[in-house]
Amino acid sequence: MAYTTSRIELPAMTPGSGGRHLVVHRFGQLGARPKVYLQAALHANELPGAMALHHLLPMLLKADAAGRMRGEVVVVPTVNPIGLSQLVGNRHLGRYEQLGRDNFNRNWLDLAPAVAERVGERLGADAAANVARVREAALAALGELHPLNELQTLRVEVLKLSIDADVVLDLHCDLDALLHLFISRRDWPGAAEVLAADLGAEATLYNDPYPQSSTFVAANGALWAKLADRFPAAALPQACLAVTVEYRGQQDVNHALGAADAARLMRFLQRRGAVAGRPGPLPALKAEATPIAGMDRGYCPCSGMLVYRVAKGERVRKGQVICEVIDPSDPRGPAARTPMRAGGDGLLFARQVDGTLAWPGKGAFSIAGPKPLAHRVGLGSLDD
């Protein structure tokens, strides 16, 4: 099989409206290993990942034409046509579905119960056989579903593309951030460490034992961890490296970054053996992985204007003022500023944009710290 492209049609939701669709690019041989699945813009107003794939696709076309594909690579450059279409008041609102108010990266299917029911008794000491059985059962479970609407169809069809992959990369971004990753603790050190080095991640945050929130990455990666926990006597490796890649901030969409990110992705594909080539020495790791429980998140305590005292990328200390919420109607000057302080030591890797509107509960910053924080223990990988 050479390069192919296809469309996945989604059902129309209103009379007289045409259904939306996904465009899927496949490189290499169907069924070849490793299989790598890449998608971008699940939160549809997060486009730096789509820019990286824009630059990666011609590289993959060239490799495919030259016979250098060793595995199978599946690419969906914009995976959420529903969110892409949500234009309101001259603004693009792509994080939540407007019909059901669902976060596009939440409430993905947990296939572990269905897979366990199908193959649990047949899992034994042969790891390769177990992996094949689990993948076959997961695809069969997806094939038996009958989604009712557009969003459900999107989720089922996308999982059919990814659930049997060795590597799943979901490309997102933050508002104003450094390049960072969200991973499972079971992938570090090892496969995730290699990815972090190749991509140049400034921070990597892990959940332990597996992603607790119902994200797309959790649907793919946590399947293996959950089955391994349920069947401890069986040889069940963590057969899918599933990672959320946060490509900096929403405004970081340009050719220079896109081309550099694509080159790093290709280097990783070569190192994994999906594409023939010499990736070169593994770059030095920029940061060790830290626990999600050590990630301090600042939430605005009141309304006003959000103004920062600290730039992203700075190391901060517990108690340090990161930003202020300013009441513009208060004439008292400095007394009108409500400071927001770091809850722990670490790297300020993500924040909002200076001068934006603040409201009670709005997330203002994220700090990657090495030690679990009492107020963060038990929380999932990503806040809503």
Image (cartoon, rainbow, N blue to C red):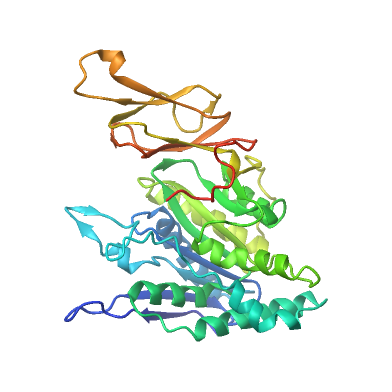
Q: Residue 379 location, x and y as percent?
A: 54, 47
Specify whether 21 is left or right of 117.
left
The quarter of the displayed image where residue 347 is located: top right
Specify whether 39 is left or right of 360.
right
349 or 62: nearer the viewer:
349
Specify whether 296 is left or right of 197.
left
| Residue drawn 24% across the image and 13% down it | 332
Specify whether 6 is left or right of 273.
left
Q: Is residue 305 above or below residue 207?
A: above
| Residue drawn 64% across the image and 36% down it | 370
| Residue drawn 18% across the image and 81% down it | 15
Q: Residue 380 location, x and y as percent?
A: 54, 51
Q: Is residue 309 above or below residue 7?
A: above
The quarter of the displayed image where residue 279 is located: bottom right
378 or 249: nearer the viewer:
378
Q: Residue 363 location, x and y as percent?
A: 40, 40
Q: Is residue 241 above or below residue 353?
A: below
Which quadrant, please, contains the N terminus? Answer: bottom right
| Residue drawn 41% across the image and 81% down it | 6
Q: In this view of the protein, can residue 67 be seen by the observer? A: no
Q: In this view of the protein, can residue 302 be seen by the observer? A: yes
Q: Is residue 304 above or below residue 287?
A: above
275 or 22: nearer the viewer:
22
